[in-house]
Image (cartoon, helix red, strand yellow):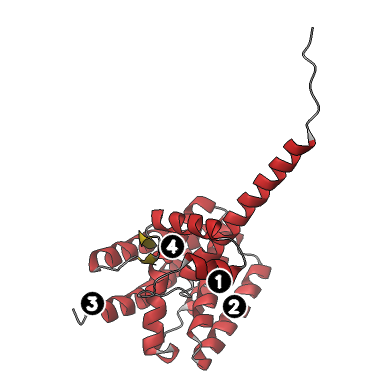
Amino acid sequence: MDAVTKPLKSHDTKAESETATDSLLRSSVYEELRSRMITGKIVPGVSLSTRSLALEMGVSQMPVRDALSRLAAEGAVQIRSKRRIEVSPMTSERLDDILDSRLLLEPEAAVYALPNITPTIFKTLKEIDASLDQAMEDGDVVRYMEYNFRFHFTIYRANNRPVLNRLIESLWLQFGPFMRVVNGRYGTANLVDQHRMAMDAIQSADANALRDAIAADLRDGMGLLIRDTFSKA
């Protein structure tokens, strides 16, 4: 005799719904904190309080703790105690490693994306770059970093390679807080916008020129960070 399938009890359905909601909340908190680090809204030298972050985000401390543990596993923060969580310190070796890794991955990610950059995507890039230029003119470092991230990843995400793009994001996660400090110290007036070269390369469908433009952009930004961080050592 075939086994009779019992109907799902209401409390089972409720438990599954609560589990799904909890999982979504944890993911949302993690992605928000990750985004803050990538765009430099979390800076080195400032202790992160799970309680303060939870209050700010309107959630309990548990998903914040979970998110910070995940960020620690990615090398972005160090959990020294329950009350002392900080951005992981930067060393010259680590910074060189990040730059080398970015130069290996990002120019190729852009080239993979090139065949898929539609006129609509290109229009979006132009709008982002205009907003970035305005942020530079206004001296708004936070907006500059946000639009710089959007510009690069609007290109990269057209490549349909989510694993590659997630690896690149993990590198941005590690240098973002330090880049925020450097940009804040020197101001946006000293930044060079290499994005026009990238857009010209995209418009002419020139893979080599796009590869070179992205590499030049990375070297400019990371070079400034390297000089500022270690020239006085």
Residue type pointed to by label 3:
Phe
Residue occupied by mark 3: 230
Label 3: few (<14), some (14–19) or many (≥20) C-alpha neighbours in 10 Å:
few
Disc number for residue 106: 4
**Where in the figure is residue 111, as x and y percent of width and height?**
49, 61
Q: Are marks 2 and 1 in contact (CB under 8 Å)?
A: yes
- The local secondary structure at tag 4 comes to helix
Callout 1 crowding tier (Cα within 10 Å): few <14, some 14–19, many ≥20: some
Question: Mark 2 to mark 4: distance in Å?
Answer: 19 Å
Residue type highlighted by circle 1: Arg
Q: Amino acid at mark 4?
A: Glu
In the picture, the disc for residue 150 is 1
Mark 3 or mark 1: which is in front?
Answer: 3
Rate crowding at label 2 as few (under 14), some (14 to 19) or many (20 or more) other CA atoms within 10 Å: many
In the image, which is nearer the foreground, mark 4 or mark 1? 1
Q: Secondary structure at mark 3?
A: helix
Q: What is the C-alpha distance between the residues marked 3 and 2?
A: 32 Å
Residue 152 visible: no
Q: Are marks 3 and 4 in contact (CB under 8 Å)?
A: no
What x and y, as percent, mark residue 68? 46, 59
* Quadrant housing the N terminus: top right
Q: Is residue 115 left or right of residue 170?
A: right
Labelled disc at residue 128: 2
